[in-house]
Amino acid sequence: MRIVIVNGPNLNWLGRRQPEIYGDLGLGAINDRIRDAVSQEGEVDFFQANGEGELIDILQAQADICQGIVLNPGAYGHYSLGLADALSALPVPVIEVHLTNVFAREEYRQRHVTAGACQGYICGLGWQGYILAVQALLDYDEEGD
C-alpha cells in the first residue's frame, strides 16, 4: 500500500519556526521517523508545498497512484475552500493532521474548512499524529471501509 504525506505552508521550516510551539524536529527528521515506523507495512512518499495551487496539484496527481493521503494543510486548513473542494473530489481517503492542538490555540485556528472533506482528523499529538494517520489508512484499506 502506498501512502502519501503532504505538508503545506511553512512546514518546511519546522525546527526553526517557533520551536516552542511546533517542536525542534525538522520536517526531514519527522519524515524519517514516519518512514521508519511504517516501512514494514507500506510505502510512504513525502511532499511539501507552500502554495495553495501547488498543494492541490500534488493531491490530484498523487490520488491516482496511492491508496491514501495524510495531509497537514497548515494555515490553509482554516480558510481554503479551493483545497476543501479538491479534497472532496479525491477518490482516496484523506486524514488531516496538525502538530498542535489547534483547539487550545487562537480562535481563528479552531475553524477548519478542510476537515469536513477528510475521513479523519488528528491534532495535538506532534509528529506522532502522522504515524497514527498512516496506521489508520493502512487499517482502512484492510477493512475496506
Image (cartoon, helix red, strand yellow):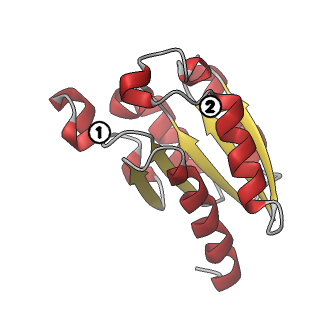
Q: Using residue 128 as the reference point, say whether residue 26 is left or right of it.
A: right
In the picture shown, does residue 42 fall above or below 128?
below
Q: Using residue 107 as the reference point, say whether residue 69 is left or right of it.
A: right
In the picture shown, does residue 25 fall above or below 133?
above
Q: At 48% from the left edge and 62% from the top edge, which residue is drawn?
A: 119
The label number, if any, that marks residue 56 in the structure image: 2
Q: Using residue 103 as the reference point, say whether residue 59 is left or right of it.
A: right
Which amino acid is tagged 2?
Ile
**x, y (%) of residue 76?**
43, 27
The label number, if any, that marks residue 102 in the structure image: 1
Which amino acid is tagged 1?
Val
Residue at the extreme bottom = 143
**x, y (%) of residue 132?**
55, 61
**Element type where label 1 sits in the image:** helix
Q: At 62% from the left edge and 27% from the top edge, which residue is drawn?
A: 26
Q: At 57% from the left edge and 68% from the top edge, which residue is drawn?
A: 136
Q: Quadrant of the C terminus?
A: bottom right
**x, y (%) of residue 111?**
25, 38
Mark 1 residue crowding within 10 angstroms, few (<14) / some (14–19) / many (20+): some
Looking at the picture, tell me which residue is in the foreground, 2 or 42.
42
In the picture shown, does residue 94 fall above or below 59?
below
